[in-house]
Image (spheres, rainbow, N blue to C red):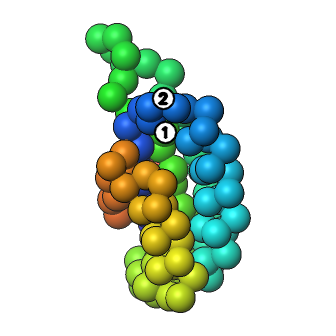
Amino acid sequence: MVKFVATYTKPADPEAFDKRYQEHLAVALAMPNVKGIRLSKATGAPRGESPVYQIAEVLYENADTMMASLSSREGIKAYKDVMAFAKDLVKMHFAQEREYGR
């Protein structure tokens, strides 16, 4: 599985950010071939407060599907939407998931 990962630094108004992000989720979920979206809120770091506020993972079956989704009309709409409210807070990444267990 591959992921489009967006990390967000702490917004000036977390409550307003969270409300607006809920609206953004509907836009992001409209992108084609999205298998799901995982959201995580940072709760701290080993040495105190984390510089990360939220991590969003958009899940795809493979890299080709992800790239087609992100470059689709809906993907461009999602990008423009997040830039409208979080352009100074977000960093975007591509990731390949590997799972290890005991």
Residue 52 in sight here: yes
Residue in the image at 37% along x and 55% along y: 87
- Tell me which amino acid carries mark 2: Ala
- Tell me which amino acid carries mark 1: Gln
Answer with left or right where residue 23 lies relative to residue 53: right
Vertical placement of residue 54 versus 96, above or below: above
Query: Can you identify the residue that label 1 sits on?
Result: 54
Judge by depth and name the residue closer to the eye, 58 or 89.
89
Answer with left or right where residue 12 lies relative to residue 51: right
In the rendered structure, which disc, 1 or 2, sits on the residue that comes first in sequence?
2
Judge by depth and name the residue closer to the eye, 3 or 42.
42
How many marks can you see?
2
Query: Can you identify the residue that label 2 sits on?
Result: 42
Residue in the image at 46% along x and 71% along y: 80
Vertical placement of residue 69 versus 18, above or below: below
Tell me whether the residue at label 1 lies in contact with that at label 2, contact meaning CB atoms closer than 8 angstroms: yes
Vertical placement of residue 20 versus 72, above or below: above
Residue in the image at 43% along x and 18% along y: 44
Residue 34 image offset from top left, x and y in percent:
61, 72
Mark 1 closeness class: few <14, some 14–19, many ≥20 residues within 10 Å? many
Q: What element carries label 1?
A: strand
Judge by depth and name the residue closer to the eye, 77 or 51.
77
Splitting the image into 4 quarters, where does residue 12 fall? top left
